[in-house]
Image (cartoon, rainbow, N blue to C red):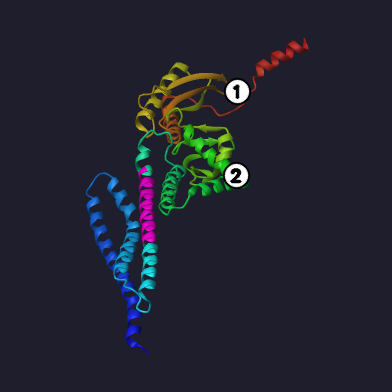
């Protein structure tokens, strides 16, 4: 047995593999040190752009280590000791060509991943501060990343000299069959785009559905719109149904809304005094209670001679929908205390029989 030839065969395999593994280990160590330093530096800056870039290149850094390991391993790869020169040259040429293509694909994939992550984060962080045509949702973030991935795949296919025209034609024919099979899903996707573009229902808006559910819109995804109700439950509404539903948006045209409280006082009350006292209480609530609008002038409007009281409405204003509950709470407490102090009576709901009137009616009927 030729031990010298066997050792050469083993070294022909072991040496490039060892170089590759060593490069990966060193790469991981360098990765940890470099990104630790970058993270410490980014904490000192006010902008979030550096944090986004660092997070975007952190995962592709592993691919770059693999590429470097393959490249260095290929540099140490010699000719197989058991083949003639012609066979050696042919095999080595195939190996080099294959590794070159692998490195090219890995390079473009790493750049694609980095750009997709970067664009997704930038859209999430910065687009929310701008009035764009498409507000930031899960749907818009995913679409932006998919566009980057598709461009990256097309570039890779072009670099590999693969004709993409037949692929696109096949996708066009197959896409028709997929569209027919996924009608409901595609309907929800396009309805989601319509909801986002129309800006009639936006992330953060407080809405009420025609079925009675109400809450904050937290996200618009491929299939559903998430509405977080006040009890902290989430309602998932299919985008297609939401686009067709009657929805009350309490944040349009703006967040401020009227808060109307119904009150009733005794028939013997001095209505001018009632109006004055009620407006004073309402003004104090507007100034003191969180969520009130201090510049708003409350109004009192009498409207009904009820069975046991004269009823009126008190109009106040809240900064947003959920502020009305605390405003009503404080207004009712303060109004009850002030009425008691001023001697204004809020009657119980009673029905009284006027005996003298009844007797007069009986006499006319009897006569």
In the rendered view, does 7 fall on the left or right side of 223? left
The answer to whether 159 is drawn above or below residue 96 in the figure is: above
Q: Earlier in the sequence, mark 1 or mark 2?
A: 2
Count neighbours of disc 2 (C-alpha within 10 A) and say few if under 14, some if 14 to 19, many if 20 or more. few
Residue 43 image offset from top left, x and y in percent: 24, 51
> Splitting the image into 4 quarters, where does residue 211 fall?
top right
Residue 359 image offset from top left, x and y in percent: 70, 16
Return the residue at label 1: 307
In the rendered view, does 351 fall on the left or right side of 144? right
The quadrant of the image that shows the N terminus is bottom left
Count neighbours of disc 1 (C-alpha within 10 A) and say few if under 14, some if 14 to 19, many if 20 or more. few
Q: Which mark is residue 130?
A: none
Q: Is residue 107 magenta?
A: yes
Q: Which is nearer the eye, 152 or 230?
A: 152
| Residue under the image location 69 percent in, 17 percent down | 358
Return the residue at label 2: 176
Q: Which is nearer the eye, 200 or 146?
A: 146
> Splitting the image into 4 quarters, where does residue 295 fall?
top left
Q: CA gap, disc 1 to disc 2? A: 68 Å
Residue 139 image offset from top left, x and y in percent: 47, 43
Residue furthest right as drawn: 366
| Residue under the image location 39 percent in, 61 percent down | 102
Magenta region, residue range:
100-122
Q: How many marks?
A: 2
């Amino acid at each position: 047995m030729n031990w010298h030839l066997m050792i050469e065969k083993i070294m022909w395999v072991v040496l490039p593999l060892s170089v590759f593994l060593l490069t990966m280990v060193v790469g991981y160590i360098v990765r940890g040190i470099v990104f630790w330093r970058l993270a410490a530096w980014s904490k000192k800056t006010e902008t979030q752009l550096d944090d986004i870039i660092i997070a975007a290149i952190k995962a592709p850094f592993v691919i770059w280590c693999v590429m470097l390991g393959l490249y260095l391993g290929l540099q140490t790869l010699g000719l197989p000791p058991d083949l003639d020169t012609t066979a050696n040259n042919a095999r080595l040429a195939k190996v080099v060509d294959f590794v070159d293509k692998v490195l090219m694909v890995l390079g473009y994939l790493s750049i694609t991943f980095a750009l997709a992550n970067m664009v997704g984060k930038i859209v999430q962080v910065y687009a929310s501060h701008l009035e764009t045509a498409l507000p930031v949702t899960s749907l818009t973030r995913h679409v932006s990343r998919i566009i980057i991935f598709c461009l990256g795949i097309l570039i890779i296919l072009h670099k590999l000299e693969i004709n993409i025209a037949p692929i696109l034609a096949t996708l066009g024919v197959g896409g028709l069959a997929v569209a027919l099979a996924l009608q409901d899903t595609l309907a929800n996707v396009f309805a989601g785009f319509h909801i986002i573009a129309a800006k009639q229902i936006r992330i953060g808006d407080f809405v009420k559905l025609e079925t009675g559910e109400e809450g904050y819109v937290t996200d618009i995804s491929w299939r559903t719109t998430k509405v977080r109700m006040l009890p902290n439950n989430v309602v998932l509404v299919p985008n297609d149904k939401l686009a067709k539903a009657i929805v009350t948006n309490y944040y349009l045209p703006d967040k401020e809304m009227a808060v109307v409280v119904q009150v009733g006082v005794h028939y013997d009350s001095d209505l001018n005094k009632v109006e004055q006292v009620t407006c004073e209480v309402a003004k104090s609530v507007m100034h003191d209670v969180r969520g009130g609008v201090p510049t708003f002038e409350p109004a009192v409007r009498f409207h009904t001679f009820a069975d046991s009281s004269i009823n009126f409405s008190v109009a106040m204003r809240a900064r947003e929908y959920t502020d009305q509950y605390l405003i009503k709470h404080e207004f009712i407490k303060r109004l009850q205390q002030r009425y008691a102090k001023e001697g204004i009576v809020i009657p119980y709901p009673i029905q009284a029989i006027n005996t003298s009137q009844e007797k007069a009616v009986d006499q006319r009927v009897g006569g």
